[in-house]
Image (cartoon, rainbow, N blue to C red):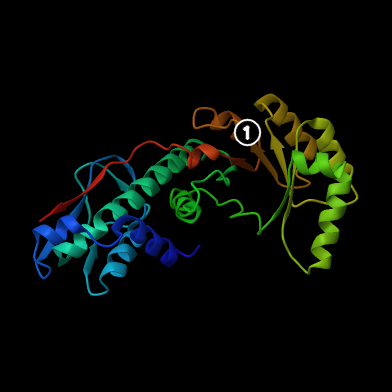
């Protein structure tokens, strides 16, 4: 889904046939200003989308950014100010806050993890464990926080997981079919293979077909260290399963190239923002 479509549908959901409170209380031509107040400490995200929300409602609205995406902020700062009709400001308020609070919380958690493993070469990946129809903005927030986006969906990579292997019969057969499929359809997609243990890892490394990355799923740090040593940098390595901000360092220090974390976009800590009339 494109951002413009996302904003349009979100406004339809929120506004319906009109903001009847504002229509009842305020003249339609009343012009006012408002400021976005930061009330939490963390990483600001969603500024560009906030601008799009206001400009979708009123292309002539005056939106002045005072901070930018990725900025470290503390309570008391002002992120932007906007001037236009009171009706349009109030119509945009909730969607703007919902987007920026969600994105800022994700960016903040991501930045915390990224900074905790900065002494390693490991990169932080997101996953497809996102809110339905919100994936694009949530992955944008991960990138703003310093993380790296994994595949966007089922269409931009071949990711051979445990169920695929079980259905196909073996890692070798799954790789053969994936390779054949890509050639038949003239597709150039990366192939990532998930393994559950060292035996499956050896099967992958011994395969006649190569993968672009191996995903070491639910390996505890000690087993992960063994797996990374076994791979010996023949292909990039990724760890997943049960990785949290609390244990990310122990995984990253094994020498793995990537850690993928569903918790980046699942229940991130709250981030408080408010839009106040001036």
Q: Nearer the viewer, residue 197 or 227?
A: 197
Q: Where is residue 211 shown, x and y percent of the image? A: 78, 51
Residue lying at 27% horizontally and 40% vertically, measured from the top left: 40
Q: Nearer the viewer, residue 60 or 79?
A: 60
- Please identify the residue farthest to the front as the structure is shown: 17
Q: Is residue 113 left or right of residue 155?
A: left
Local crowd at mark 1 within 10 Å, few (<14), some, or many (≥20)? some
Q: Can residue 66 be seen at all in this image of the molecule?
A: no
Q: Where is residue 221 shown, x and y percent of the image? A: 65, 27
Q: How many marks?
A: 1
- The image quarter containing residue 7 is bottom left
Instruction: Return the residue at label 1.
Output: 241
Q: Can residue 19 be seen at all in this image of the molecule?
A: yes
Q: Where is residue 267 shown, x and y percent of the image? A: 44, 36
Residue lying at 12% horizontally and 59% vertically, measured from the top left: 24
Q: Where is residue 126 shown, x and y percent of the image? A: 55, 45
Q: Is residue 184 left or right of residue 22?
A: right
- Please identify the residue farthest to the bottom as the structure is shown: 60
- Does dot 1 land on a helix, a strand or a loop? loop
Residue lying at 65% horizontally and 59% vertically, measured from the top left: 156
Q: Is residue 157 left or right of residue 20?
A: right
Q: Quadrant where the C terminus lies? A: bottom left
Residue lying at 24% horizontally and 59% vertically, measured from the top left: 91
Q: Nearer the viewer, residue 100 or 255?
A: 100
Q: Is residue 185 above or below residue 209?
A: below
Q: Is residue 165 above or below residue 85?
A: above
């Amino acid at each position: 889904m494109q951002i413009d479509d996302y904003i349009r549908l979100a406004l339809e959901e929120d506004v319906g046939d009109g903001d009847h409170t504002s229509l009842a209380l305020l003249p339609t031509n009343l012009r006012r200003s408002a400021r976005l107040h930061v009330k939490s400490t963390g990483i600001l995200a969603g500024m560009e989308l906030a601008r799009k929300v206001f400009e979708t409602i009123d292309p002539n609205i005056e939106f002045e950014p005072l901070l930018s995406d990725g900025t470290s902020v503390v309570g008391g700062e002002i992120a932007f100010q906007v001037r236009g009709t009171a009706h349009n400001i109030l119509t945009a308020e909730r969607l703007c806050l919902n987007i920026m609070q969600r994105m800022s919380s994700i960016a903040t958690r991501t930045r915390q993890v990224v900074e905790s493993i900065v002494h390693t070469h490991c990169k932080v990946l997101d996953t497809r464990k996102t809110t339905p129809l919100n994936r694009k903005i949530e992955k944008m927030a991960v990138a703003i926080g310093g993380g790296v986006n994994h595949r966007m969906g089922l269409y931009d990579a071949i990711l051979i997981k445990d169920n695929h292997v079980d259905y196909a019969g073996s890692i070798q057969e799954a790789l053969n079919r994936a390779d054949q499929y890509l050639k038949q359809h003239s597709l150039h997609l990366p192939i990532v293979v998930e393994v559950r243990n060292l035996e499956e890892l050896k099967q992958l490394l011994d395969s006649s077909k190569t993968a672009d990355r191996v995903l070491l799923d639910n390996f505890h740090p000690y087993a992960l260290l063994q797996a990374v040593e076994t791979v010996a940098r023949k292909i990039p390595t990724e760890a997943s399963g049960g990785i949290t901000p609390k244990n990310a360092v122990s995984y990253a220090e094994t020498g793995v190239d990537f850690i993928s974390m569903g918790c980046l976009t699942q229940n991130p800590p709250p981030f408080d923002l408010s839009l106040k009339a001036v």
